[in-house]
Image: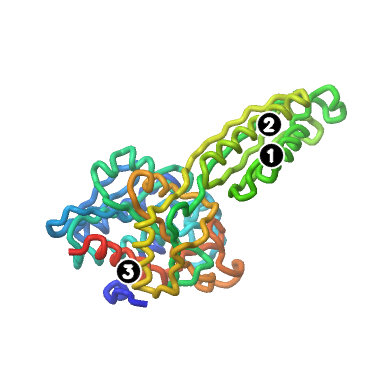
Amino acid sequence: MNLIDRIVQFRAEIQAIRRDLHAHPELAYEEHHTSDKVAELLARWGIEVQRGLGGTGVVGVLRNGTGTRSIGLRADMDALPIEEANRFGHASKHGGRMHACGHDGHTAMLLAAAKYLAETRPFDGTVNLIFQPAEEGGAGAQKMIDDGLFDRFPCDAVFGMHNWPGYEVGQFATTPGPMMASGNRFEITVTGRGAHAAMPHLGVDPVFVAVQIVQGLQGIVTRNMKPIDSAVLSITIIKAGDAVNVVPDTALISGGVRTFDPAVTGLIEERMRRIAQLTAEAHGASAHVTFERYYPVTVNDPAQAAFAAAVAADIVGAENVFDRCEPTMGSEDFSYMLLARPGAYVQIGNGDGSHRLAGHGEGPCMLHNPSFDFNDELIPIGATFWVRLVEKFLAR
């Protein structure tokens, strides 16, 4: 690998910062310790700092030369409401919160790049270092945009990067066009009429109705959509009742829908509403459906995706860059930034899990897992990628 020697030299410093962030995880819009740390470091390194966008967001600005072009590099900062299973020294000190998606590592990689860029300024133009809050369902990217991100800090292109378990350390992946699916969530409230469980005929059982609705919803993907369209409809929550001898008044069904096509999302919503309402009516109950589109499809600009892949290939070799990787049904609020500016989203391999202590599960330990930990070997690789991206995009 063609890593930048200076970044390799200060890897231990950045690794310590990453592990401090891991030990002090903060949920969406609560990233006060994290944003304070980021802002303090950027200022120490001589980088102009702007705070408050998206609440706890931080933007560092580096200018050099007379060039008018600009580039945005984005890292997310928030953690997840998960109880950590790891017992290493930098495990979460806050119960019920952990960095189970590697945002601590994303922040660290961008900080490492910021430190090097501030020391050397090997570019002509402006670099906007975007440290974003609330990626995990909070739409922090859109909040930063609403607060004037691209008006105050113009970017000719914007790039994001996420660690990816299963890809080897030293591998990158991206693709032109759709990279990650849209994120949509729904909630169906079924209202019946409560009764004694020994006399269900005197009421209308919403639990029974909810079960019929769930069965019907599974037919949307298998029987209403074109087989060549991609979609996932997952029922993840069913709640009803408080006692074994009581038929409750209501039952709740909720879950998520992922697609790559707004028209497919619309079809699923329409069929969901009809199935829920008509099934409930058939059994003497009623159903209310709430359907929320919270993240759009993450769509890479083809030219910028090809550019990012070429930069990565110069670092790790073309054989380690998958420039037409298979899109994932996960969703990502970097999609909002790609709606506002051309750019690309890149995955960087997090390895096979061997960097973690034994005893917490085998294999790569996928994202959103209580045994997950970011692989610190990625710090100089990801930081080198960011720096080379800047150098080539803002070449003198």
229 lies left or right of 35:
right
Q: How many marks?
A: 3
The residues bearing labels 3 and 1 have C-alpha atoms spaced at a distance of 47 Å
**Secondary structure beneath label 1:** helix
Q: Residue 198: give x, y in percent of width and height.
A: 87, 29
Location of residue 67 (image quadrant): bottom left
Q: Residues within 10 Å of mark 3 (few under 14, many from 20)?
A: many
Which of disc 2 and disc 3 is earlier in sequence?
Answer: 2
Q: Residue 368: give x, y in percent of width and height.
A: 54, 56
Which of disc 1 and disc 2 is earlier in sequence?
Answer: 1
Q: Residue 233: give x, y in percent of width and height.
A: 63, 45
Between 304 and 385, the one lying in front of the other is: 304
What residue is shown with label 2?
A: 276
What residue is shown with label 3?
A: 384
What residue is shown with label 1?
A: 217
Quadrant in which the C terminus is drawn:
bottom left
Contact flag, marks 3 and 1 (Cβ < 8 Å): no
